[in-house]
Amino acid sequence: MIQITPAIAIAESEITLEFVRASGPGGQNVNKVATAVQLRFDARNSPSLPDGVRERLVRIAGKQVTEEGVLVIEARRFRTQERNRQDAIDRLVALILKATQEPKARRSTRPTAASKRRRLETKHRQSEKKRLRQPPAEE
């Protein structure tokens, strides 16, 4: 079990880890050893997550989620499988923790009297500037 919050825990059976070869520089080691980790977590169908958290997780993860709702995290920062595996799990936990925080509802506010006054003064100055640029009116 991976404990995220006191109320939320994910069974390790819900996570699939696949080790693949990492791309980029690294010499012979990169070509021989599969150290990069691909973590897959079915976020849309996970029984461990409450509905609100599940929806926010899919929205927060963005392009990391497939059309089927599977969250894919690739970790290849380190040279060992174990550290990349731990990095992928840590990133999953961080994403879920971020999804547990409900966004604050926005309360609409009204403009202050001072801001209204400043806006009107600016408009008046601007119109005065334009008026002075016009040719004098003939009588």
Image (tube, grey):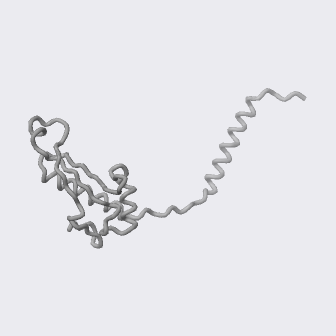
Q: Measuring from the top left, give residue 90's x and y in whole percent.
A: 23, 57
Q: Measuring from the top left, give residue 33's x and y in whole percent.
A: 10, 43
Q: Quadrant of residue 88?
A: bottom left
**Looking at this view, is 44 or 55 the one in front?**
44
Residue, x 18% and y 42% (percent of image)? 22
Residue, x 32% and y 50% (percent of image)? 64
Q: Is residue 128 left or right of residue 18?
A: right
In the image, residue 14 sits, relative to residue 60, either above or below, namely below
Residue, x 37% and y 51% (percent of image)? 62
In the image, residue 74 sits, relative to residue 58, either above or below, namely above
Q: Residue lying furthest right in this view?
A: 139
Quarter placement of the C terminus: top right
In the image, residue 77 sits, relative to residue 91, either above or below, namely above
**Looking at this view, is 121 or 25 the one in front?**
25
Quarter placement of the N terminus: bottom left
**Looking at this view, is 132 or 39 the one in front?**
39
Q: Measuring from the top left, give residue 30's x and y in whole percent.
A: 13, 39
Q: Quadrant of residue 94?
A: bottom left
Residue, x 45% and y 63% (percent of image)? 104
Q: Quadrant of residue 111?
A: bottom right
